[in-house]
Protein backbone atom coordinates (compact mmCIF):
# COMPACT_ATOMS: atom_id res chain seq x y z
CA UNK A 1 0.00 0.00 0.00
CA UNK A 2 1.38 3.41 -0.96
CA UNK A 3 1.58 6.13 1.65
CA UNK A 4 -1.08 8.76 1.15
CA UNK A 5 0.26 11.96 -0.37
CA UNK A 6 -1.55 14.68 1.53
CA UNK A 7 -2.97 17.75 -0.18
CA UNK A 8 -2.81 20.80 2.04
CA UNK A 9 -6.34 21.94 1.06
CA UNK A 10 -8.05 18.58 1.74
CA UNK A 11 -9.55 17.28 5.00
CA UNK A 12 -8.68 13.89 6.47
CA UNK A 13 -8.67 11.95 9.72
CA UNK A 14 -7.13 8.80 11.18
CA UNK A 15 -7.87 6.74 14.27
CA UNK A 16 -4.93 5.18 16.03
CA UNK A 17 -3.05 4.14 19.15
CA UNK A 18 -0.20 6.33 20.36
CA UNK A 19 2.73 5.83 22.71
CA UNK A 20 6.18 7.21 23.51
CA UNK A 21 8.39 4.44 22.13
CA UNK A 22 8.20 0.85 20.97
CA UNK A 23 9.22 -0.20 24.50
CA UNK A 24 6.26 1.70 26.01
CA UNK A 25 3.48 0.12 23.92
CA UNK A 26 1.79 -1.10 27.11
CA UNK A 27 1.00 2.51 28.07
CA UNK A 28 -0.60 3.35 24.73
CA UNK A 29 -3.74 5.44 24.48
CA UNK A 30 -6.36 5.82 21.72
CA UNK A 31 -6.71 8.97 19.69
CA UNK A 32 -7.90 10.53 16.48
CA UNK A 33 -5.77 12.73 14.22
CA UNK A 34 -7.76 15.24 12.19
CA UNK A 35 -6.60 17.72 9.60
CA UNK A 36 -8.33 20.60 7.86
CA UNK A 37 -6.76 23.71 6.33
CA UNK A 38 -8.80 25.87 8.73
CA UNK A 39 -7.91 24.06 11.96
CA UNK A 40 -4.62 22.35 11.07
CA UNK A 41 -3.38 19.08 12.58
CA UNK A 42 -5.04 18.10 15.84
CA UNK A 43 -4.71 15.04 18.08
CA UNK A 44 -7.97 14.20 19.91
CA UNK A 45 -7.00 11.93 22.80
CA UNK A 46 -8.43 9.91 25.68
CA UNK A 47 -5.89 8.75 28.31
CA UNK A 48 -6.93 6.27 31.00
CA UNK A 49 -3.47 5.11 32.17
CA UNK A 50 -2.27 7.04 35.23
CA UNK A 51 1.32 5.91 34.65
CA UNK A 52 1.64 7.82 31.40
CA UNK A 53 3.96 10.81 31.19
CA UNK A 54 2.47 14.23 30.56
CA UNK A 55 5.20 15.80 28.37
CA UNK A 56 6.61 14.46 25.09
CA UNK A 57 8.70 15.85 22.25
CA UNK A 58 7.02 13.40 19.89
CA UNK A 59 4.73 10.38 19.87
CA UNK A 60 4.68 7.30 17.68
CA UNK A 61 1.61 5.31 16.78
CA UNK A 62 -0.24 2.85 14.59
CA UNK A 63 -3.05 4.24 12.42
CA UNK A 64 -6.26 2.55 11.33
CA UNK A 65 -4.82 2.06 7.83
CA UNK A 66 -2.11 -0.19 9.31
CA UNK A 67 0.62 2.41 8.89
CA UNK A 68 3.18 3.42 11.45
CA UNK A 69 3.27 7.13 12.17
CA UNK A 70 5.10 9.80 14.14
CA UNK A 71 3.47 12.87 15.65
CA UNK A 72 5.97 15.66 16.22
CA UNK A 73 5.02 18.05 19.01
CA UNK A 74 5.95 19.01 21.65
CA UNK A 75 3.00 17.67 23.65
CA UNK A 76 1.90 18.67 27.13
CA UNK A 77 -1.12 16.83 28.57
CA UNK A 78 -1.07 18.45 32.01
CA UNK A 79 -3.93 20.79 31.13
CA UNK A 80 -6.18 18.02 29.85
CA UNK A 81 -9.81 17.80 30.75
CA UNK A 82 -10.70 15.25 33.45
CA UNK A 83 -13.57 12.75 33.55
CA UNK A 84 -14.35 11.09 36.88
CA UNK A 85 -16.05 7.72 36.92
CA UNK A 86 -14.97 4.15 37.49
CA UNK A 87 -11.71 5.39 36.00
CA UNK A 88 -10.32 8.91 35.88
CA UNK A 89 -9.47 9.75 32.28
CA UNK A 90 -7.74 12.67 30.66
CA UNK A 91 -9.14 13.95 27.39
CA UNK A 92 -8.75 16.87 25.05
CA UNK A 93 -7.22 18.18 21.84
CA UNK A 94 -3.59 19.02 21.11
CA UNK A 95 -1.96 20.68 18.13
CA UNK A 96 0.56 18.64 16.12
CA UNK A 97 3.41 20.33 14.26
CA UNK A 98 4.04 17.48 11.79
CA UNK A 99 2.44 14.14 11.00
CA UNK A 100 4.80 11.59 9.46
CA UNK A 101 3.15 8.50 7.98
CA UNK A 102 5.17 5.35 7.32
CA UNK A 103 7.79 5.10 10.08
CA UNK A 104 8.57 5.46 13.77
CA UNK A 105 10.96 8.39 14.01
CA UNK A 106 12.01 10.94 16.56
CA UNK A 107 12.00 14.71 16.39
CA UNK A 108 15.76 14.81 15.74
CA UNK A 109 15.76 12.55 12.66
CA UNK A 110 17.80 13.99 9.77
CA UNK A 111 16.88 13.86 6.08
CA UNK A 112 18.76 14.47 2.86
CA UNK A 113 15.95 15.27 0.42
CA UNK A 114 12.29 16.08 0.05
CA UNK A 115 9.92 16.11 -2.90
CA UNK A 116 6.86 18.34 -3.02
CA UNK A 117 4.42 20.22 -5.21
CA UNK A 118 2.31 23.32 -4.61
CA UNK A 119 -1.39 23.73 -5.26
CA UNK A 120 -0.95 25.79 -8.47
CA UNK A 121 2.30 24.26 -9.64
CA UNK A 122 0.83 21.92 -12.28
CA UNK A 123 -0.90 24.76 -14.15
CA UNK A 124 2.24 26.91 -13.87
CA UNK A 125 4.33 24.36 -15.78
CA UNK A 126 1.75 22.65 -18.04
CA UNK A 127 -0.10 24.54 -20.76
CA UNK A 128 -2.67 21.75 -21.21
CA UNK A 129 -5.36 20.56 -18.80
CA UNK A 130 -5.25 16.99 -20.11
CA UNK A 131 -1.89 15.62 -18.95
CA UNK A 132 -2.42 12.38 -20.89
CA UNK A 133 -0.80 14.11 -23.86
CA UNK A 134 2.30 15.01 -21.81
CA UNK A 135 5.08 12.39 -22.03
CA UNK A 136 6.60 11.02 -18.83
CA UNK A 137 10.33 11.64 -18.36
CA UNK A 138 12.55 9.65 -16.01
CA UNK A 139 15.33 12.22 -16.10
CA UNK A 140 15.10 15.63 -14.43
CA UNK A 141 13.19 18.27 -16.38
CA UNK A 142 15.42 20.96 -14.84
CA UNK A 143 18.19 21.07 -12.26
CA UNK A 144 19.14 24.11 -10.18
CA UNK A 145 22.41 23.90 -8.25
CA UNK A 146 22.99 26.13 -5.23
CA UNK A 147 25.45 26.26 -2.35
CA UNK A 148 25.54 22.62 -1.14
CA UNK A 149 21.96 22.08 -2.34
CA UNK A 150 20.22 20.96 -5.53
CA UNK A 151 16.65 21.54 -6.67
CA UNK A 152 15.30 19.38 -9.49
CA UNK A 153 12.03 19.58 -11.36
CA UNK A 154 10.85 16.04 -12.01
CA UNK A 155 7.86 13.99 -13.14
CA UNK A 156 5.98 11.97 -10.54
CA UNK A 157 3.42 9.49 -11.81
CA UNK A 158 1.17 6.70 -10.57
CA UNK A 159 0.57 3.53 -12.55
CA UNK A 160 -1.69 0.47 -12.58
CA UNK A 161 -0.54 -3.00 -13.66
CA UNK A 162 -2.10 -3.94 -17.04
CA UNK A 163 0.04 -6.98 -17.83
CA UNK A 164 -2.15 -9.41 -19.86
CA UNK A 165 -5.05 -6.91 -19.67
CA UNK A 166 -3.99 -4.32 -22.21
CA UNK A 167 -6.44 -5.44 -24.90
CA UNK A 168 -9.35 -4.88 -22.52
CA UNK A 169 -8.45 -1.22 -22.17
CA UNK A 170 -8.25 -0.14 -25.82
CA UNK A 171 -11.11 0.09 -28.35
CA UNK A 172 -11.26 1.29 -31.97
CA UNK A 173 -14.55 1.66 -33.88
CA UNK A 174 -13.14 0.79 -37.33
CA UNK A 175 -13.35 -3.02 -37.81
CA UNK A 176 -10.08 -3.42 -39.76
CA UNK A 177 -8.11 -1.22 -37.39
CA UNK A 178 -9.61 -3.06 -34.42
CA UNK A 179 -8.55 -6.45 -35.82
CA UNK A 180 -5.01 -5.22 -36.49
CA UNK A 181 -4.76 -3.79 -32.99
CA UNK A 182 -6.24 -6.94 -31.43
CA UNK A 183 -3.72 -9.16 -33.24
CA UNK A 184 -0.86 -6.93 -32.15
CA UNK A 185 -1.99 -6.91 -28.51
CA UNK A 186 -2.42 -10.71 -28.51
CA UNK A 187 1.15 -11.06 -29.72
CA UNK A 188 2.28 -8.77 -26.90
CA UNK A 189 0.24 -10.80 -24.39
CA UNK A 190 1.85 -13.98 -25.69
CA UNK A 191 5.38 -12.76 -25.12
CA UNK A 192 7.31 -13.96 -22.09
CA UNK A 193 7.99 -10.49 -20.73
CA UNK A 194 10.51 -10.14 -17.91
CA UNK A 195 8.94 -6.82 -16.88
CA UNK A 196 5.38 -5.99 -15.91
CA UNK A 197 3.36 -3.56 -18.05
CA UNK A 198 1.88 -0.46 -16.39
CA UNK A 199 -0.71 2.09 -17.48
CA UNK A 200 -0.07 5.62 -16.30
CA UNK A 201 -2.93 6.99 -14.17
CA UNK A 202 -1.65 10.38 -12.99
CA UNK A 203 1.22 12.66 -13.90
CA UNK A 204 2.49 15.77 -12.15
CA UNK A 205 5.63 17.82 -11.85
CA UNK A 206 7.29 18.09 -8.46
CA UNK A 207 10.37 19.68 -6.99
CA UNK A 208 13.03 17.49 -5.39
CA UNK A 209 15.26 19.40 -2.97
CA UNK A 210 18.51 17.75 -1.90
CA UNK A 211 20.73 18.84 0.97
CA UNK A 212 22.46 16.61 3.48
CA UNK A 213 21.71 16.34 7.18
CA UNK A 214 18.55 18.45 7.28
CA UNK A 215 15.95 18.61 10.03
CA UNK A 216 12.28 18.36 9.17
CA UNK A 217 11.97 22.03 10.18
CA UNK A 218 14.70 23.19 7.77
CA UNK A 219 13.19 21.22 4.86
CA UNK A 220 9.75 22.67 5.48
CA UNK A 221 11.31 26.11 5.66
CA UNK A 222 12.81 25.80 2.16
CA UNK A 223 9.53 24.35 0.84
CA UNK A 224 7.65 27.34 2.24
CA UNK A 225 10.18 29.74 0.71
CA UNK A 226 9.69 28.20 -2.74
CA UNK A 227 5.90 28.01 -2.41
CA UNK A 228 5.81 31.70 -1.38
CA UNK A 229 7.61 32.48 -4.64
CA UNK A 230 4.78 30.75 -6.54
CA UNK A 231 2.24 32.75 -4.51
CA UNK A 232 3.72 35.98 -5.86
CA UNK A 233 4.20 34.73 -9.41
CA UNK A 234 0.66 33.40 -9.90
CA UNK A 235 -1.01 35.97 -7.62
CA UNK A 236 -2.70 33.37 -5.39
CA UNK A 237 -1.83 31.50 -2.18
CA UNK A 238 0.43 28.47 -2.65
CA UNK A 239 1.49 25.93 -0.04
CA UNK A 240 3.73 22.85 -0.16
CA UNK A 241 1.80 19.60 -0.48
CA UNK A 242 2.20 15.93 -1.48
CA UNK A 243 5.43 15.91 0.49
CA UNK A 244 7.85 12.97 0.69
CA UNK A 245 10.98 13.02 2.84
CA UNK A 246 14.04 10.83 2.36
CA UNK A 247 16.25 9.80 5.27
CA UNK A 248 20.01 9.46 5.09
CA UNK A 249 19.82 6.04 6.77
CA UNK A 250 16.58 4.86 5.16
CA UNK A 251 15.69 3.20 1.87
CA UNK A 252 12.21 4.57 1.33
CA UNK A 253 10.35 7.86 1.35
CA UNK A 254 7.90 8.89 4.04
CA UNK A 255 4.80 11.02 3.61
CA UNK A 256 4.40 14.07 5.84
CA UNK A 257 2.14 17.06 6.35
CA UNK A 258 2.64 20.12 8.53
CA UNK A 259 0.24 22.10 10.65
CA UNK A 260 -1.44 25.08 8.99
CA UNK A 261 -4.22 27.44 10.07
CA UNK A 262 -5.74 29.22 7.07
CA UNK A 263 -8.65 31.61 6.83
CA UNK A 264 -11.59 30.64 4.64
CA UNK A 265 -10.83 33.43 2.16
CA UNK A 266 -7.27 32.18 1.73
CA UNK A 267 -8.50 28.62 1.19
CA UNK A 268 -10.99 29.78 -1.47
CA UNK A 269 -8.25 31.62 -3.38
CA UNK A 270 -5.85 28.68 -3.06
CA UNK A 271 -8.49 26.28 -4.43
CA UNK A 272 -9.48 28.53 -7.32
CA UNK A 273 -8.49 27.01 -10.64
CA UNK A 274 -6.07 29.16 -12.65
CA UNK A 275 -5.36 28.32 -16.27
CA UNK A 276 -1.74 28.31 -17.44
CA UNK A 277 -2.45 31.02 -20.01
CA UNK A 278 -4.39 33.17 -17.55
CA UNK A 279 -1.59 33.29 -14.98
CA UNK A 280 0.09 36.70 -14.62
CA UNK A 281 3.41 34.85 -15.02
CA UNK A 282 3.99 31.21 -15.95
CA UNK A 283 7.11 29.13 -16.54
CA UNK A 284 7.60 30.47 -20.07
CA UNK A 285 8.06 34.06 -18.88
CA UNK A 286 11.00 33.60 -16.52
CA UNK A 287 14.43 32.03 -16.14
CA UNK A 288 13.47 29.72 -13.28
CA UNK A 289 17.09 28.82 -12.43
CA UNK A 290 17.98 32.48 -11.90
CA UNK A 291 14.71 33.39 -10.16
CA UNK A 292 14.82 30.51 -7.63
CA UNK A 293 18.44 31.07 -6.62
CA UNK A 294 17.94 34.81 -6.28
CA UNK A 295 14.70 34.40 -4.32
CA UNK A 296 16.28 32.00 -1.82
CA UNK A 297 19.03 34.54 -1.19
CA UNK A 298 16.56 37.48 -0.86
CA UNK A 299 13.70 35.79 0.97
CA UNK A 300 14.57 36.96 4.48
CA UNK A 301 14.58 40.56 3.27
CA UNK A 302 11.22 40.30 1.48
CA UNK A 303 9.36 37.64 3.46
CA UNK A 304 6.75 40.14 4.70
CA UNK A 305 5.56 41.00 1.19
CA UNK A 306 5.72 37.29 0.28
CA UNK A 307 3.50 36.50 3.28
CA UNK A 308 0.93 39.03 2.02
CA UNK A 309 0.57 36.96 -1.17
CA UNK A 310 0.74 33.56 0.57
CA UNK A 311 -2.07 34.39 3.00
CA UNK A 312 -4.15 36.71 0.82
CA UNK A 313 -7.89 36.38 1.45
CA UNK A 314 -9.21 38.89 -1.10
CA UNK A 315 -11.06 41.12 1.36
CA UNK A 316 -10.05 43.78 3.88
CA UNK A 317 -11.43 45.31 7.01
CA UNK A 318 -10.85 49.05 7.39
CA UNK A 319 -8.15 48.34 9.96
CA UNK A 320 -6.34 45.94 7.58
CA UNK A 321 -6.59 48.41 4.68
CA UNK A 322 -4.98 51.11 6.84
CA UNK A 323 -2.20 48.72 7.90
CA UNK A 324 -1.52 47.80 4.26
CA UNK A 325 -0.95 51.43 3.29
CA UNK A 326 1.49 52.06 6.17
CA UNK A 327 3.37 48.83 5.41
CA UNK A 328 3.57 49.44 1.67
CA UNK A 329 4.60 53.08 2.13
CA UNK A 330 7.53 51.84 4.22
CA UNK A 331 8.48 49.42 1.45
CA UNK A 332 8.28 52.16 -1.20
CA UNK A 333 10.58 54.28 0.93
CA UNK A 334 13.02 51.35 1.20
CA UNK A 335 13.07 50.97 -2.60
CA UNK A 336 13.96 54.64 -3.05
CA UNK A 337 16.67 54.32 -0.41
CA UNK A 338 18.21 51.31 -2.22
CA UNK A 339 18.08 53.14 -5.55
CA UNK A 340 19.47 56.31 -3.89
CA UNK A 341 16.48 58.39 -4.92
CA UNK A 342 15.07 61.28 -2.86
CA UNK A 343 11.42 61.09 -3.98
CA UNK A 344 10.69 58.21 -1.62
CA UNK A 345 7.09 57.54 -2.73
CA UNK A 346 6.92 59.15 -6.16
CA UNK A 347 10.03 57.52 -7.59
CA UNK A 348 9.18 53.77 -7.22
CA UNK A 349 5.58 54.23 -8.37
CA UNK A 350 6.61 56.05 -11.55
CA UNK A 351 9.68 53.89 -12.15
CA UNK A 352 8.15 50.43 -11.89
CA UNK A 353 4.52 50.95 -12.97
CA UNK A 354 3.13 50.20 -16.39
CA UNK A 355 0.93 52.97 -17.86
CA UNK A 356 -2.19 51.07 -16.75
CA UNK A 357 -0.97 50.61 -13.19
CA UNK A 358 0.15 54.23 -12.94
CA UNK A 359 -3.28 55.38 -14.14
CA UNK A 360 -4.97 53.05 -11.62
CA UNK A 361 -2.93 54.49 -8.73
CA UNK A 362 -3.60 58.08 -9.82
CA UNK A 363 -7.34 57.44 -10.00
CA UNK A 364 -7.31 55.70 -6.60
CA UNK A 365 -5.59 58.74 -5.05
CA UNK A 366 -7.63 61.38 -6.90
CA UNK A 367 -9.76 62.28 -3.87
CA UNK A 368 -6.62 63.34 -2.01
CA UNK A 369 -6.37 66.35 -4.36
CA UNK A 370 -2.58 66.55 -3.96
CA UNK A 371 -0.03 67.94 -6.40
CA UNK A 372 1.72 64.56 -6.89
CA UNK A 373 1.43 60.84 -6.19
CA UNK A 374 4.26 61.07 -3.70
CA UNK A 375 2.61 63.87 -1.73
CA UNK A 376 -0.70 61.98 -1.65
CA UNK A 377 0.86 58.73 -0.41
CA UNK A 378 3.05 60.47 2.15
CA UNK A 379 0.23 62.59 3.54
CA UNK A 380 -2.16 59.63 3.72
CA UNK A 381 0.46 57.47 5.42
CA UNK A 382 1.09 60.17 8.04
CA UNK A 383 -2.61 60.68 8.73
CA UNK A 384 -3.07 56.95 9.33
CA UNK A 385 0.09 56.50 11.41
CA UNK A 386 -0.04 59.57 13.65
CA UNK A 387 -2.72 59.92 16.31
CA UNK A 388 -4.21 63.38 16.48
CA UNK A 389 -3.08 64.46 13.02
CA UNK A 390 -5.92 66.17 11.07
CA UNK A 391 -7.59 63.66 8.73
CA UNK A 392 -7.84 65.87 5.65
CA UNK A 393 -7.45 63.04 3.14
CA UNK A 394 -8.90 60.21 5.23
CA UNK A 395 -12.18 62.07 5.63
CA UNK A 396 -12.68 61.85 1.85
CA UNK A 397 -11.96 58.14 1.42
CA UNK A 398 -14.07 55.01 1.82
CA UNK A 399 -12.81 51.47 2.36
CA UNK A 400 -12.81 50.70 -1.38
CA UNK A 401 -10.47 53.67 -1.92
CA UNK A 402 -8.09 52.40 0.77
CA UNK A 403 -8.15 48.88 -0.70
CA UNK A 404 -7.41 50.14 -4.23
CA UNK A 405 -4.59 52.40 -3.05
CA UNK A 406 -3.00 49.54 -1.09
CA UNK A 407 -3.42 47.13 -3.99
CA UNK A 408 -1.67 49.48 -6.41
CA UNK A 409 1.19 50.04 -3.97
CA UNK A 410 1.54 46.27 -3.46
CA UNK A 411 1.85 45.72 -7.21
CA UNK A 412 4.63 48.32 -7.40
CA UNK A 413 6.56 46.64 -4.59
CA UNK A 414 6.29 43.10 -5.96
CA UNK A 415 7.21 44.43 -9.42
CA UNK A 416 10.40 45.91 -7.97
CA UNK A 417 11.11 42.55 -6.34
CA UNK A 418 10.56 40.73 -9.64
CA UNK A 419 13.13 43.03 -11.20
CA UNK A 420 15.56 42.04 -8.43
CA UNK A 421 14.87 38.39 -9.31
CA UNK A 422 15.91 39.01 -12.91
CA UNK A 423 12.45 39.02 -14.52
CA UNK A 424 12.22 41.22 -17.61
CA UNK A 425 10.27 44.48 -17.32
CA UNK A 426 8.04 43.50 -20.26
CA UNK A 427 6.96 40.39 -18.32
CA UNK A 428 6.50 42.47 -15.15
CA UNK A 429 4.25 44.96 -16.92
CA UNK A 430 2.17 42.11 -18.33
CA UNK A 431 1.89 40.77 -14.77
CA UNK A 432 0.55 44.14 -13.66
CA UNK A 433 -1.96 44.32 -16.52
CA UNK A 434 -3.36 40.86 -15.69
CA UNK A 435 -3.48 41.55 -11.96
CA UNK A 436 -5.36 44.84 -12.05
CA UNK A 437 -9.05 44.63 -11.10
Image (spheres, rainbow, N blue to C red):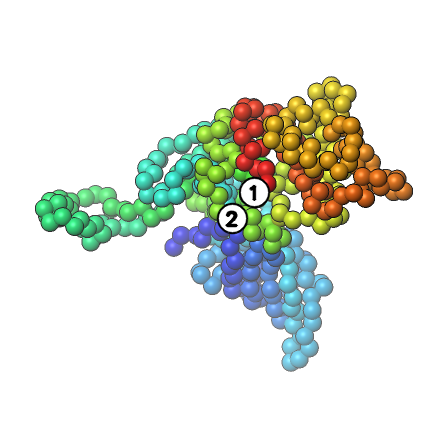
Q: Percent from the top left, x then y, of residue 149?
A: 53, 30
User: In which quadrant is the C terminus drawn?
Assistant: top right
Mark-to-mark CA distance, 1 and 2: 9 Å
Percent across and percent down for residue 222 are 57, 37
Of pointers 1 and 2, the one earlier in the residue sequence:
1
Q: Is residue 79 above or below residue 200?
A: below
Residue at 45% across, 53% down: 4
Q: Crowdedness of circle 1 by 10 Å Cα count: few (<14), some, many (20+)?
A: many
Q: Mark 2: give few (<14), some (14-19) or many (20+) Cα within 10 Å.
A: few
Q: Is residue 72 visible?
A: no
Q: Quadrant of residue 206?
A: top left
- Label drawn at residue 236: 1
Whether pointer 1 and pointer 2 mark residues with C-beta atoms closer than 8 Å, the reply is yes
Image location of residue 303, percent across then percent down = 65, 36
Does the rendering let one see residue 319?
A: yes
Looking at the picture, tell me which residue is in the foreground, 387 or 271: 387
Q: Is residue 374 left or right of residue 256?
A: right
Taking the spot 60% from the left edge, 42% from the top edge, the residue there is 310
Horizontally, residue 278 falls left or right of residue 220, namely left
Q: Is residue 87 left or right of residue 371?
A: left
| Residue 50 versus residue 427 in the image, above or below | below
Residue at image point 66% right, 23% down: 351
Q: Nearer the viewer, residue 175 or 19?
A: 175
Residue receiving disc 2:
272
Question: In the image shown, does 83 or 257 lie closer to the viewer?
Answer: 257
Q: Quadrant of the rendered structure where residue 345 is?
A: top right
Secondary element under disc 2, as helix, strand or loop, is loop
| Residue depicted at x 71% and y 23% | 347
Place of residue 197 in the rendered image (x, y in percent of width and height, measured from the top left): 24, 46
Kindly give the residue lying farthest to the top in the view shown: 340
Q: Nearer the viewer, residue 405 or 201?
A: 405
Amino acid sequence: MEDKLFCVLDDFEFFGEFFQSEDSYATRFPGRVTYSPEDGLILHYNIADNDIKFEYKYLIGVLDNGKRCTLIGPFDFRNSGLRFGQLTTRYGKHKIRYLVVGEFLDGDTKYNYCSFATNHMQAFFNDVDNLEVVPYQDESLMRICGDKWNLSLENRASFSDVTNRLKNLVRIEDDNARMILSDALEKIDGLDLSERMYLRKELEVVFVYEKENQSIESLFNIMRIISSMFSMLVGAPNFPEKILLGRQDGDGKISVISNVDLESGTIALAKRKINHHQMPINCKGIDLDKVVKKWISLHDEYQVIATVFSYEKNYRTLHEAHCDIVLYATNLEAISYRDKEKLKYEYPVCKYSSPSLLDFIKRSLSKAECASIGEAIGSLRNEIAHVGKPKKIMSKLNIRDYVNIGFGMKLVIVSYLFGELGIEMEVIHRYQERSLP
